[in-house]
Image (tube, coloured by chain):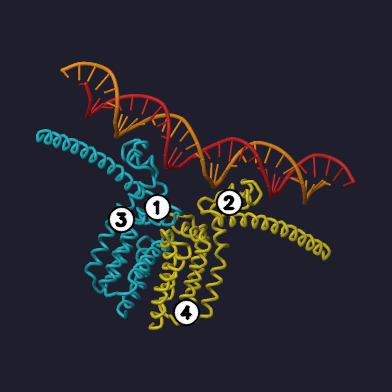
Chain colours: A cyan, B yellow, C red, D orange
DNA sequence: TGTACATCAGTGAACGCGCGTTCACTGATGTAC
DNA sequence: TGTACATCAGTGAACGCGCGTTCACTGATGTAC
């Protein structure tokens, strides 16, 4: 009885180890594909990124991708989630140690990040504007928006806001999103000049919010 | 000499009339195509609107469209310009008779209009996000943004703002754009509820701006 | 007034391309006995 | 230890669709003489 239990146990552990190893391998292969996708996103507008090129980048055949991702949208959604992890972390750091200029700092962080990784921003907007998306996909794509809103909540709360915190976060997020969308193809302006302009416009709003909260 | 002049004159007038008539006909046919396009935009997401369906709607063959528009993008850009004329007018009316609630009124007008004619908003965003567009096309598509910014300038000036007027308009426009983009596929919320939420968020910003300008 | 010619709107069908996804198959590795 | 069988990652090629745009042509109308 005991022996059989031990054997069973060993057996199960072994199986467990094997399947875990397999899982790990699978995870690694996914990783390779994701990295290839991210590389592609860095190279060209996201709506030109296609499965064939991702496959080529990863050194596999297009058909293989479908062993790891059900379809292109899921792949893109995951790339978006991964690609934007950092900005959420950074905003969290700013929000946690809330100081006089925190609102503007957060705005600058947002703008810096998404001006640098423009494709992710476009991908996000694209998911947002996409009409009826399936719920699961929508959740995945909206994860970043939700996360940023949470960080903004933290920020405004730490700055002493007590009422309508989520609403203020929404306003802040919308403003930043709008700034990224609106100032883009500024004819005759360089990338740097656009960046400066974006921050100036953001400064208007963050300034108003700063004093608004102080008066709150 | 005099006679020949008269004849020439008559002749020229006649030719002028003829070509004018031809121009008018041409203009009318363009009109028919444009209206067909607008009808299509009202029916489905703009990125599903295609030349074949527009042609069918207009009762002509797809090839014919190319007698009146060089390509699809121009057609879309013109549809956008036409479809958004009204909102510019409305905002102008609000800006002209600037009163206590004008900022919020303008925001509500913007949101009302684009929530109703969602396709035009998406089309606008699409043009904005499109990477390197040819300059002429860009101009056309951006006409509406410029016009609205001008109206906002008028509004803020009338409300007594003296510094950074264009910058404030930029911030206002970006916020409204962001609000439209961000609150869209709100899971479990009806179209009306989304509308209400959009206006609430806009209210946060317009409120801040109102007091901000008063203090200015 | 009639005739040859030019102009041009309009057309259905086809071209061409991009691209997500699937198919039918191969070959390596693991498993049962 | 060897053998038949199952599993499954991986693949090149093809499917299928959408869709902007062009082609080669027709037919009506206007023009010159």
Q: CA distance from mark 3 to mark 4?
A: 38 Å
Task: Pick whichever, A174 or A163, lies toward us.
Answer: A163
Q: Residues within 10 Å of mark 3 (few under 14, many from 20)?
A: many
Q: Which mark is residue B70?
A: 2
Q: Residue at x 63, y 50 (%)?
A: B67
Q: CA distance from mark 4 to mark 2?
A: 44 Å
Q: Label 4: chain? A: B
CB atoms at circles 4 and 1 under 8 Å apart? no
Q: Quadrant of the N terminus of chain A?
A: top left
Q: Quadrant of the C terminus of chain A?
A: bottom left
**Regarding mark 1 in the picture, which secondary structure is present there?**
helix
The residue beneath circle 3 is A84
Q: Is residue B109 visible?
A: yes
The residue beneath circle 4 is B101
Q: Is tag 4's residue or tag 2's residue first in the polypeptide sequence?
A: 2
Frontmost of labels 4 and 2 is 4
Res C31 quadrant in image: top left
Q: Residues within 10 Å of mark 2 (few under 14, many from 20)?
A: few
CB atoms at circles 2 and 3 under 8 Å apart? no
Frontmost of labels 2 and 3 is 3
**Regarding mark 4 in the picture, which secondary structure is present there?**
loop
Q: Label 3: chain? A: A
Q: Label 1: chain? A: A
Q: Is tag 3's residue or tag 1's residue first in the polypeptide sequence?
A: 3
The residue beneath circle 1 is A135
Q: Is residue A135 left or right of residue D20?
A: left
Q: CA distance from mark 1 to mark 2?
A: 39 Å
Q: Are marks 2 and 3 on the same chain?
A: no
**In x, y percent, where is residue A27?**
26, 42
Task: Pick whichever, B158 or B83, lies toward us.
Answer: B83
Q: Residues within 10 Å of mark 4 (few under 14, many from 20)?
A: few
């Amino acid at each position: 009885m005991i022996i059989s239990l031990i054997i069973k146990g060993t057996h199960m552990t072994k199986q467990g180890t094997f399947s875990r190893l397999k899982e790990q391998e699978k995870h690694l292969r996914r990783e390779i594909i994701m990295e290839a996708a991210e590389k592609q996103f860095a190279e060209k507008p996201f709506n030109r990124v296609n499965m064939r090129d991702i496959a080529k980048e990863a050194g596999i055949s297009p058909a293989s991708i479908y062993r790891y991702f059900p379809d292109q949208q899921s792949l893109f959604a995951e790339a978006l989630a991964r690609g934007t992890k950092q900005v959420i972390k950074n905003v969290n750091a700013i929000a946690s140690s809330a100081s006089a200029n925190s609102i503007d700092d957060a705005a600058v962080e947002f703008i810096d990040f998404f001006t640098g990784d423009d494709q992710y921003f476009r991908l996000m907007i694209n998911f947002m504007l996409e009409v009826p998306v399936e719920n699961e996909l929508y959740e995945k794509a909206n994860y970043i928006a939700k996360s940023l809103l949470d960080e903004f909540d933290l920020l405004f709360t730490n700055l002493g806001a007590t009422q309508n915190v989520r609403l203020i976060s929404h306003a802040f997020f919308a403003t930043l999103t709008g700034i990224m969308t609106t100032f883009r193809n500024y004819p005759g302006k360089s990338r740097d000049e656009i960046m400066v302009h974006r921050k100036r416009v953001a400064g208007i709003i963050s300034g108003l919010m700063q004093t608004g909260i102080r008066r709150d």
